[in-house]
Amino acid sequence: MSASSTAAKFRYASTRLFSTFTTRQAAMARRSAVAISLARKKPPKKTAPKLKRKGVVRFSPLSSRIATAVYVDQEAKEYDDAGLVIEDTTPPTSFPLDGGIPPASSSSEACVAQGLDFDDASVALKSKTTGELLRATIVLQLCRLPPLVAYGRRMYALACKVLGQKVTDVAVKATFFGHFCGGESEAELKPLLQRMKALGVGGILDYAAENDVPEADKDERGEGVVSARTFDYVNEKMCDANAEMVERAIEAASRAMEGGEGRTQFAAMKLTAFGQPALLERTSRVIQALQVAFAQLDTKHVGTLTVSEVREGFKLMGVSLSPDELEALLDTMDKDKNGTIDSTEFLDTLSPLDPASAPLFTQAITPLFVKSDEHLEALEADEILQLNSMNKRLKRVAQKASDMGVSLMIDAEQTYMQPAIDQVALSLMREYNTDRAVILNTYQCYLRDSFQRVRTDIDRSEFYSFVFGAKIVRGAYMVQERRRAEEMGYPDPIQPDLESTHRNYDAVAAFILSHKVSLSSGAPPTELTEAEKKTRRRRSKTLLMVASHNENSVLSTVGLMSSMGLAKDSGVCFGQLRGMCDHVSLSLGSNGFWVYKYLPYGPVKEVMPYLLRRAEENSTLMAGAGKERGLLARELRSRMGLGA
């Protein structure tokens, strides 16, 4: 089978994968936008009886692959205050892969052919000192204790109070911090990076301070909602200092892999280090309001609006623009000048940083789905200035990454801030991903809408002709997200079970890989038009970071690479957290795959929220790390002469 036919099958299969419930995913997106934007503490009341409803849902019509109408004719579950249908969003129990993704046996055979062996302790642990093996054994055993994970925050706070910050931090650094983190400073990172480089493993540097919405704003999110860290915004100077720290991480990443034979170097960052988390949340609510407004204006269910429909819609939304300002905005919005505006053009144009559309964010917006006696809290002028300052920092950091040949991964955060983060990430991609993937956005595959978001963003990359970059993870905020959804009365955004998350993760990986190899072969190059050659070159530069500790997902991706004819150095990367899954990382590295360890670093006190969140969110993973504990025990026995 040719690579082109294989790629076609993968694209078809991964598209078919969710074809049975794309309508449900669209409904989920609309429903979540309404629920999060209105942010009730009580669930919405049913305002209409059950009935049969038939409509049309269209996703972004920028390419024929996605511009297919999906007709629905099913019983509505309930109605919310906006009058939108609340449909069942439970994914199917099985997916019609039609042979598109290789079965496990063929993936395993491909991995054996590549020399991968995740069971060989000598390969996995040969670089560790006996002291490091003992520390790893102790730490992983402690992580099995539910009380330690459940009460870790309280125990750390109590230890600081009784023993003092310095003594507590010394103890933490010798155990958990030393096992999971790269160090407190760049100087401490350097020898570790050199050791990893010798083993074929790269580093993803991340200054791991975590911020969240201030305590003062918690009443809007739910009083009992657990957050990664409660952060009181200090001032713009602190944000400038965080940006400088990311710039130094980029410089360190560039130096770390010198002589690395063309391997991509990575740094990571969180947007909440660049400005007020509460501001990102408020901006996200306005973006979600605009998403719902577009859906409500699209009364014909065709996925596009005419210029006159947008003009009238703005009037209904209470936006005050002069005729000249309005016409200039509409002209900018119709990017392909075809007389219609789709949802992508609509949302990509409306930015609080653009003076032409800033009134949508600064005025008291009353979107169509909001009752006449309610108003969405809009951004104020000084907040727009803070957003502009954040944007300047981000562009400075992105330019640094571009100049130094480093790729910068923007971490995903909580769903109530993610729309604003996505908008920033895609804006940076359009500006900097012209020749390579400088910016990567992160997709949390435990979210129900993640597959559709990837499809839509790949579609954006085609429309705007930029190189797509993505890091895919299973997710890191499940406890917070589910508790917040329960307290605020909107649907749980998380997949219903772990198996659904696994299937979704593998589907997202397959879909991105199929995009990467599409047009990569088939017709002889001499028969391709210049436009097709350009598209092929751009798609082949797609950069994917498969960030996973799941051996099956890693094996599946390696099998896909083999089936699609993708080389080990083709821009498909693997990533694991430091201190976890070393048997996978070192096996991949020793066999020439691009694999990286995520290296959070920074002062112990500031990194503790990261460590505690990881303990909470990965408690099941760490408690079930029996294989890693077994490999550690086997290697220790071998070094002590006690046999395997």
Image: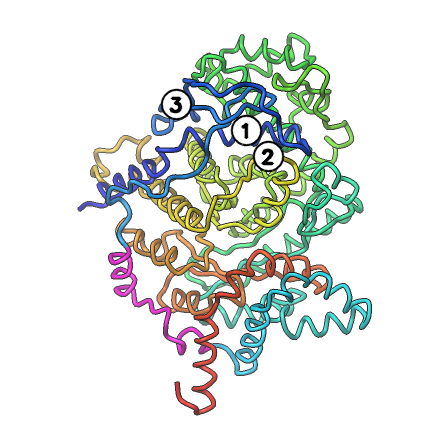
From the top left corner, tell me how far across and down residue 554 is, in percent.
Answer: 38, 57
Q: For label 1, count other residues whose C-alpha is less than 10 Å away and answer few (under 14), some (14-19) or many (20+).
A: many
Q: CA distance from mark 3 to mark 2?
A: 23 Å
Q: CA distance from mark 2 to mark 1?
A: 8 Å
| Residue type, mark 2 in image | Tyr
From the top left corner, tell me how far across and down residue 617 is, in percent.
Answer: 57, 56
Q: Which residues are magenta?
A: 104-126
Residue plotted at (53% across, 83% down): 130
Q: Is residue 413 magenta?
A: no
Circles 2 and 1, Cβ within 8 Å, touching? The answer is yes
Q: Is residue 291 above or below residue 611?
A: above
Residue plotted at (47% across, 40% down): 450
| Residue type, mark 1 in image | Arg
Circles 3 and 2, Cβ within 8 Å, touching? The answer is no
Residue under pointer 3 = 72
Residue 547 left/right relative to 324: left
Front residue of 565/288: it is 288
Q: For label 2, count other residues whose C-alpha is less than 10 Å away and answer few (under 14), some (14-19) or many (20+).
A: many
